Image (spheres, rainbow, N blue to C red):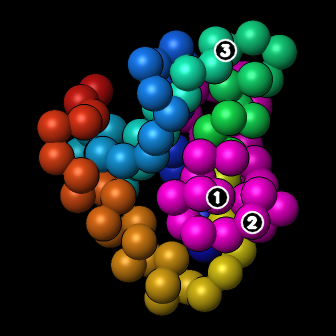
């Protein structure tokens, strides 16, 4: 499954949840700063944990130096879609 994420570096905790804007863009907050790819690495680890897959099953497709990224998550498609819907529905976490 490919999905778009919005990384928020420098957060107080690392977590995936909430919607960015009006679309299906998942917010991923990370404690790491956006230096030398640390925030991207932390975001990919957080996504793996949130979707219950190994880190090797999550790959960056585009956006290495941008806050908005496209990632590929490997696994059971319907199960991943259900989990994405749950994460996007997390209230009070994200706004553009």
Q: Position of residue 73 (x, y in %)?
A: 66, 66
Residue 34: give its label. 3
Mark 3, secondary structure of its residue:
loop
Q: CA distance from mark 1 to mark 2?
A: 6 Å
Residue 14: give its label. none
Residues under numbered marks 1 and 2 in contact, where contact means CB atoms less than 8 Å apart: yes
Residue name at image x 59 percent, y 69 percent: 52
Per the image, is 13 magenta?
Answer: no
Give the magenta part as a residue range: 45-69
Residue name at image x 56 percent, y 85 percent: 77
**The quadrant where residue 49 appears:** bottom right
Q: Is residue 23 visible?
A: no
Mark 1, secondary structure of its residue:
helix
Mark 2 — residue? 54
Mark nearer the N terminus (2 vs 3): 3
Quadrant position of the C terminus in the picture: top left
Q: Position of residue 25 (x, y in %)?
A: 40, 48
Left or right, 55 with reference to 2: right
47 or 21, which lies in front? Answer: 47
Quadrant position of the N terminus in the picture: bottom right
Q: CA distance from mark 2 to mark 3?
A: 23 Å
Residue name at image x 32 percent, y 39 percent: 20
Mark 1 — residue? 48
Q: Residue furthest left?
A: 92
């Amino acid at each position: 499954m490919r999905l778009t994420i919005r990384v928020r570096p420098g957060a107080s905790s690392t977590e995936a949840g909430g919607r960015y804007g009006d679309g299906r863009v998942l917010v991923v907050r990370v404690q790491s700063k956006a230096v030398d790819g640390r925030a991207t690495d932390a975001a990919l680890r957080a996504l793996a944990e949130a979707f219950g897959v190994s880190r090797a099953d999550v790959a960056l497709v585009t956006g290495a130096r941008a806050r908005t990224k496209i990632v590929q998550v490997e696994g059971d498609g319907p199960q991943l879609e259900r989990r994405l819907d749950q994460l996007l529905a997390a209230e009070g976490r994200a706004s553009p």
